[in-house]
Amino acid sequence: MATAERSVARSADAPFEIRPMTPAIGAELLGVDLGSPDIGAAIPAIREALLTHKVIFFRDQDITREQHLEFAQHFGELEIHPATPKDQQHPEILRIAYDENSRGQENAWHSDVTWREEPSMGSILRAIELPAVGGDTLFACMHAAYRGLSDEMRRFVSGMIAVHDIARVFARRLGKQPQELHDKYPPVEHPVVRTHPETGLPTLYVNVAFTSHIKGLSEQESADLLRHLYAQASNPEIQCRFRWAPGSIAFWDNRAVQHFAASDYFPARRAMERATIKGDRPFYRA
């Protein structure tokens, strides 16, 4: 796990200031205008900061939806989420909004779209409307979570395979039967410990939202082991917490972190928009 001091040193030539939030995870990037026509020149340094800190934050960004998408496209092709209305003008934007008629539902530690064969590389979330207080998002470093396991447990789970299933969450949210979702998005298998394709670091890659079971174990064994692995994200020493403000943007490496959207603001309104960058198939390399 990189310390904040090492992280700053790696990014010393960046055209912006980097302010680490914790030794384990997270940094604010200061002096960046994501809507600038020459933002492309800063992309390599922004990517470096993302790989180092795993989630990066930008403040006071007065950008349009189109500029949000243009920035995200610097990092790869964008995906379309099945929860996005089919007639939406920009299908690559996933709008996440709650108010007095609904409660937030992302208040559990998870990685995005692990039910895809090729889960996302990263997500860029923009604040649109915020409650006066509450609605923070927490992030946990899953390399640190892996390192927090005992030596024997790391050996035990490395190389295991887990099954991820879209229907665990979205059957109810989309009003569909599991089989209807499985026809388009069948359950997929991913390693319990994933090797990050760019940093080479091992990361714990199971989450309470989408992981259904671990292959080769009994139902009870799988449930007990998953419960232990899920709990690793709850250690405050491997987390950072972001308090949103107007113009705030968070960009996280979905291959390296889990996140938790605190749904403590009901019945106030909170509206966010997310652009998600396509990734590749997870693998484990000993």
Image (tube, helix red, strand yellow):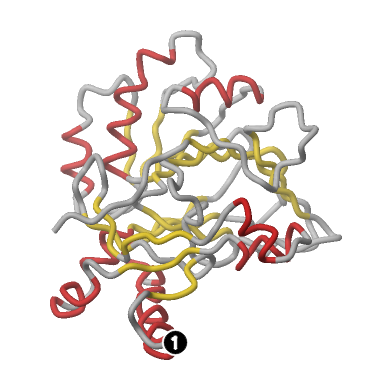
Q: Residue at x 49, y 72 (%)?
A: 212
Q: Which is more toward the observer, 238 or 155?
A: 155
Q: Secondary structure at mark 1?
A: helix
**At which x and y percent is residue 10?**
18, 34
Q: Residue furthest front?
A: 183
Q: Quadrant of residue 218?
A: bottom left
Q: Residue at x 51, y 61 (%)?
A: 187
Q: Residue furthest right?
A: 101
Q: Residue furthest bottom?
A: 220
- Amino acid type, residue under disc 1 in the picture: Glu
Q: Which is more toward the observer, 247 or 250?
A: 250
Work out which quarter of the rendered image holds the C terminus and state it. Answer: bottom left
Q: Quadrant of residue 95?
A: top right
| Relative height, residue 168 to residue 202 (above, below) | below
Q: Is residue 154 left or right of residue 164?
A: left
**At which x and y percent is residue 55?**
39, 45
Category of crowding for the residue at label 1, using alpha-carbon neighbours closer than 10 angstroms: few (below 14), some (14–19), many (at least 20): few
**At which x and y percent is residue 104?**
69, 61
Q: How many numbered badges does the structure rendering display?
A: 1
Q: Which residue is mark 1?
A: 219
| Relative height, residue 57 to residue 132 (above, below) | above
Q: Is residue 229 left or right of residue 170?
A: left
Q: Residue at x 84, y 60 (%)?
A: 100
Work out which quarter of the rendered image holds the N terminus and state it. Answer: bottom left
Q: Which is more toward the observer, 215 or 133?
A: 215
